[in-house]
Image (cartoon, rainbow, N blue to C red):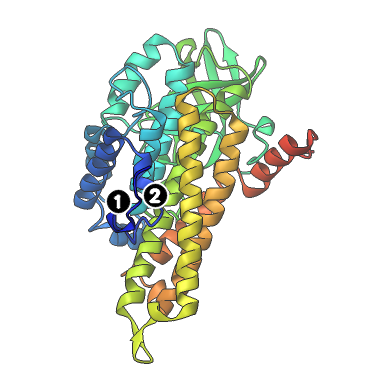
Amino acid sequence: MSHFDPTKLPALDPTDPAGLDDLLTEDEKAIRGAVRQTLDSIAEPYIAEWFENGEIPNIRELTKELGSLGVLGMHLEGYGCAGMSATEYGIACLEIEATDSGLRSLVSVQGSLAMFAIWRWGSEDQKNEWLPRMAAGEAIGCFGLTEPDVGSDPGSMQTRARRDGSDWILDGRKMWISNAPYADVAVVWAQTDEGIRGFVVPTNTPGFSAPEIKHKLSLRASATGELVLDGVRLPESAMLPEARGLKGPLSCLNEARFGIVWGALGAARSSLEAARRYSMDRVQFGKPIGGFQLTQQKLADMSLEYTKGYLLAMHLGRRKDANTLRPEQVSIGKLNNVREAIEICRTARTILGANGISLEYPVIRHQNNLESVLTYEGTVEMHTLVLGQVLTGESAFR
């Protein structure tokens, strides 16, 4: 038996005390580095200003940069998409949300909602028309499911599509739709005499409008709007031919939730690291506040919860790559990781004190953003009941 020499153990990295990097392949590390380097150049210097002003002034140029990076629909195969693994996509989401949840929302809505809907449920003509341009960031998509009075119960949607000869006529409203104000195409779900169906709607179609929702205090670096459909006439070819019932939109939501499982950790990591650095620089009572027990307890608890969330995300990513991931398991990840990420941000804010509410630091921005992430793609209550049903075999949704 060889003699164990503790002096030859690798040094601990305070930003990764558990050695989570050992779980990544070299390709995964390369993708992480490329995404981080690009965001540090095109977004990080400006993101606080974009959040404060409530807009990204160069959104189309930014989207094309993200397309060039290959993160738009990066886990989809063919049609100009990068064809990366689910875990690689998750790692990219983490890095993007470490800059801002609004940017990750742009990427998620584009790739996991709008593009995935067309890729999974669309015709070859629809795929060839939209997916290459969307993967390149030359066309922006949005996903119209939520309505003003319908959130967690999408089966009760009021938007309707009726046949008129060989065409479809859509009427209704969708609400809280990310990317809507500047989207080129909307995937819209509507009630029909055949059940719920999906439609690919170019946003320049007469009768379609997407007024922006103002006065948000969360996801301010992400444009959110309504979709107003007033007699929107579409040809038969606009329908997603393979999607029938709620299976279509729910499959898309599950893709987006997987990205959130990873993405929320990015906001948490950014806030944790800001608090850790601040605790070493801020001196009170003659020494850095990081030298006091209560501050160290906060940092230790935040690091521990981040580590557990990362391990869960990695486990779910490996399952998704092995085609063994169930939607209920994605709910476990979304429920845990967003809940713990927002608590990490709140605790980090206390370490920064008054500076924690300043946009000079990323913490309050991440905290505000996560208030939206906590609710969208399934509320805490919905994912809790999904897990409850798994544990008991009883549905408590109604």
Query: Residue 58, percent across and down?
Result: 24, 47
Q: Is residue 312 left or right of residue 4?
A: right
- Please report the residue visible at 19 percent of the width from the left and 50 percent of the height from the top: 41
Q: Percent from the top left, x then y, of residue 4?
A: 35, 51
**In the image, is 26 to the left or to the right of 23?**
left
x, y percent for residue 92: 34, 40
Which residue type does callout 1 highlight? Answer: Ile
Give the residue displayed 32% in from the left and 76% down from the top.
Answer: 280
For disc 1, the neighbor class at 10 Å (few under 14, some 14 to 19, many from 20) is: many
Q: Amino acid at mark 2?
A: Gly
Q: Residue furthest top?
A: 166
The residues bearing labels 1 and 2 have C-alpha atoms spaced at a distance of: 10 Å
Residue situated in front as seen by the camera: 395 or 285: 285
Residue 138 drawn above or below residue 270: above
Q: Element type at marker 1?
A: loop
Viewer-side label of 1, 2: 2
Write down the quadrant of residue 139 in the picture: top left
Single out the residue that lies furthest toward the left: 41
* Horizontal arrangement in the rendering, residue 258 relative to residue 13 (left or right): right
x and y percentages locating residue 328 in the rendered image: 62, 34
Q: Point out the tag, 1 or 2, that comes first from the N-terminus.
A: 1
Query: Toward the viewer: 58 or 193?
Result: 58
Q: Which residue corresponds to mark 1?
A: 56
Looking at the figure, which quarter contains the N terminus?
A: top left
Residue at the disc numbered 2: 102
Q: Residue at x 35, y 34 (%)?
A: 88
Name the residue at 43% across, 75% down: 351
Give the camera-side residue of 243 and 255: 255
Looking at the picture, tell me which residue is in the foreground, 202 or 340: 340
